[in-house]
Amino acid sequence: MARSTARVATDRPGRYAKQLAAHMGRKVPAEWSEEAGRGTLVFGAGRAELTAEDGALLLAVEGAEEDLPQLEDVVGRHLVRFGTRDELVVAWRRDSGEAGTVQRLTGEDG
């Protein structure tokens, strides 16, 4: 399995992770633990891990290499939408060392 990670700077990582898990949980299996500060999303093409740290939300997606761009986009795009006020930017880095996709607000989003 290929893996891609992103570190999203925010002073509300737990809040965003909880919101992402709750939203995605309407369509895919999802869980979030406030106590552990960790959660997962399970997609047909792979899975995502969410980890809240001081000052950042850590994201990781795993799946077949050809599915990474879609997994990055789905997780990143929804997070950016929730974090509009904070102008969150999700920049993925693949375990292969290459850059992944980037999700951020654009003029048409705001």
Image (cartoon, helix red, strand yellow):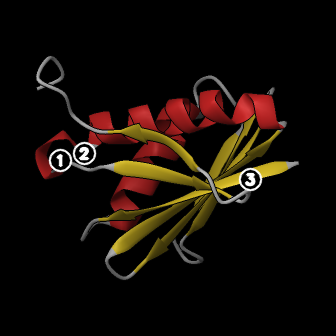
Q: Is residue 64 left or right of residue 15?
A: right
Residue 11 in the image: state x and y as whole percent. Answer: 24, 71
Quadrant location of the C terminus in the rendered image: top left
Q: Nearer the viewer, mark 1 or mark 2?
A: 1
Kindly identify the residue that appears in the image at 66 percent across and 43 percent down: 30
As displayed, is residue 39 above or below residue 22? below
Assess disc 1: are there few (<14), some (14-19) or many (≥20) residues with their C-alpha within 10 Å of its C-alpha. Answer: some
Q: Which mark is residue 110?
A: none
**Residue underneath mark 1:** 87
Residue sitting farthest toward the bottom:
54
Q: Residue at x 89, y 48 (%)?
A: 1
C-alpha gap between disc 3 and disc 2: 24 Å
Q: Earlier in the sequence, mark 1 or mark 3?
A: 3
Q: Of helix, strand and loop, which one carries label 1? A: loop
SS for tag 3?
strand
**CB-based contact (under 8 Å), mark 1 and mark 3:** no
Task: Give the numbered dot on residue 3.
Answer: 3
Q: Residue furthest right?
A: 1
Give the SS element for disc 2: loop
Q: CA distance from mark 1 to mark 3?
A: 25 Å
